Amino acid sequence: MKAQGIDALGALFDRAAVSEALDRLEQSHREVFVRAYCLRWTTRRIAADLNITEPVVKCRLHHALHALRRDLDYLLPHRR
């Protein structure tokens, strides 16, 4: 029972860290990231929705993922 409580607390902390890392993203990177990974949109659909090119979408996704990895490595060093 105690292990379940610790696991639940760890999961809660992980979600909070991910939320904090997402909040730190530049708005343009967060917009693309959410559409790609939360809504599961294609780069073509994201580009059309935001009125940008597909290469710009891919670039923003790259930068968003890099920033998230950096922040999560800092916020969750035990998860490496």
Image (spheres, rainbow, N blue to C red):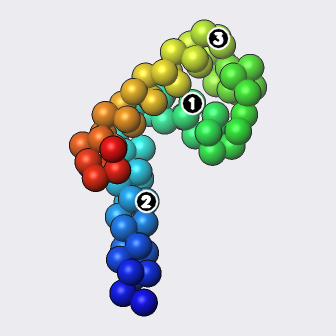
Give percent across and percent down for residue 79: 34, 50
In the rendered structure, which amino acid carries the disc numbered 2? Arg
Mark 1 or mark 3: name the one nearer the start of the chain.
1
Give percent across and percent down for residue 46: 68, 26
Q: For mark 3, give the secondary structure.
A: loop
When asked about the image quadrant of residue 68, the answer is top left
Mark 3 or mark 2: name the one nearer the start of the chain.
2
Q: Give the residue number, with chain letter if any, for mark 1.
A: 32
Q: Residue at x 41, y 73 (%)?
A: 7
* Crowding near the residue tagged with mark 2, few <14, some 14–19, many ≥20 C-alpha atoms within 10 Å: few
Side of 9 where 48 appears, left or right: right
Side of 62 where 14 appears, left or right: left
| Residue furthest bottom in the image | 1
Mark 1 or mark 2: name the one nearer the start of the chain.
2
Label 1 and label 3: CA atoms lie apart by 12 Å
* Crowding near the residue tagged with mark 1, few <14, some 14–19, many ≥20 C-alpha atoms within 10 Å: many
Q: Which mark is residue 53?
A: 3
Give percent across and percent down for residue 56: 56, 13
Q: Give the residue number, with chain letter if any, for mark 2.
A: 15
Towards the viewer: 48 or 17: 17
Q: Is residue 15 above or below residue 70?
A: below
Q: Is residue 80 above or below residue 25?
A: below
In the rendered structure, which amino acid carries the disc numbered 3? Thr
From the image, state whether disc 3 or disc 2 is nearer to you: 2
From the image, state whether disc 1 or disc 2 is nearer to you: 2
Label 1 and label 2: CA atoms lie apart by 20 Å
Label 3 and label 2: CA atoms lie apart by 31 Å
